[in-house]
Image (tube, rainbow, N blue to C red):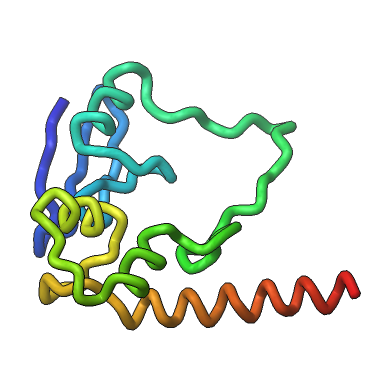
């Protein structure tokens, strides 16, 4: 297995046997073929046979967009409800792994506000459809 860093530390290309995979950085984790995990988990999965390929008669599933959630992200609630909370490095690393730390190292409260507004509108819209 050969691992090569992408420019600007954006992730890695991983070559195993004759196949090449691209693992892009997502916070403190990596995204490869739709699977989010640590670099070790991604490499272990590739070494174990790679990623499943969809069969011809597989039923396509709705793929959520990065801003689409079935419920409000718990990290967003933490960020919004406890803005003055002093978080230790473990909590900050967890928020970073889930994409809640911006490029400057600050908690992304603007994203949390946008997500809360979007989910509130979605829930209100669903309630109006039921009524």
Whether 23 is drawn above or below 53: the answer is below
Whether 12 is drawn above or below 126: the answer is above
Question: Which residue is the extreme one toward the top?
Answer: 48
Whether 34 is drawn above or below 96: the answer is above
Q: Tell me where residue 65 appears, x and y as whole percent.
A: 52, 63
- Screen quadrant of the N terminus: top left
Identify the residue shown where x is 79% and y is 73%.
Answer: 127
Q: Tell me where residue 17 appears, x and y as whole percent.
A: 25, 22
Residue 7 lies in quadrant: bottom left
Instruction: Out of 122 and 53, give the one closest to the viewer.
Output: 122
Question: Which residue is the extreme one toward the right?
Answer: 131
Residue 95 is left or right of residue 73, and the answer is left
Q: Tell me where residue 34 appears, x and y as whole percent.
A: 43, 45
Q: Tell me where residue 71 appears, x and y as whole percent.
A: 57, 59
Instruction: Out of 53 and 80, give the one closest to the viewer.
Output: 80
Q: How many marks?
A: 0
Instruction: Out of 34 and 108, give the one closest to the viewer.
Output: 108
Whether 46 is drawn above or below 38: the answer is above
Identify the residue shown where x is 30% and y is 39%.
Answer: 37
Identify the residue shown where x is 16% and y is 58%.
Answer: 92
- Screen quadrant of the C terminus: bottom right
Identify the residue shown where x is 55% and y is 78%.
Answer: 118
Residue 122 is left or right of residue 22, and the answer is right
Residue 40 lies in quadrant: top left
């Amino acid at each position: 297995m050969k691992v090569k860093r992408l420019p600007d530390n954006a992730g890695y290309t991983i070559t195993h046997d004759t196949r090449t995979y691209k693992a892009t950085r997502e916070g403190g984790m990596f995204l490869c073929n739709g699977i989010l995990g640590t670099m070790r988990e991604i490499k272990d999965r590739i070494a174990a046979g790679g990623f499943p390929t969809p069969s011809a008669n597989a039923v396509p599933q709705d793929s959520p967009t990065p801003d689409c959630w079935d419920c409000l992200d718990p990290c967003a609630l933490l960020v919004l409800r406890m803005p003055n909370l002093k978080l230790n490095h473990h909590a900050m690393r967890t928020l970073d792994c889930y994409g809640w730390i911006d490029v400057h190292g600050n908690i992304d409260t603007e994203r949390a506000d946008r997500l809360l507004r979007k989910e509130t509108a979605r829930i209100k819209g669903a309630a109006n459809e039921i009524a």
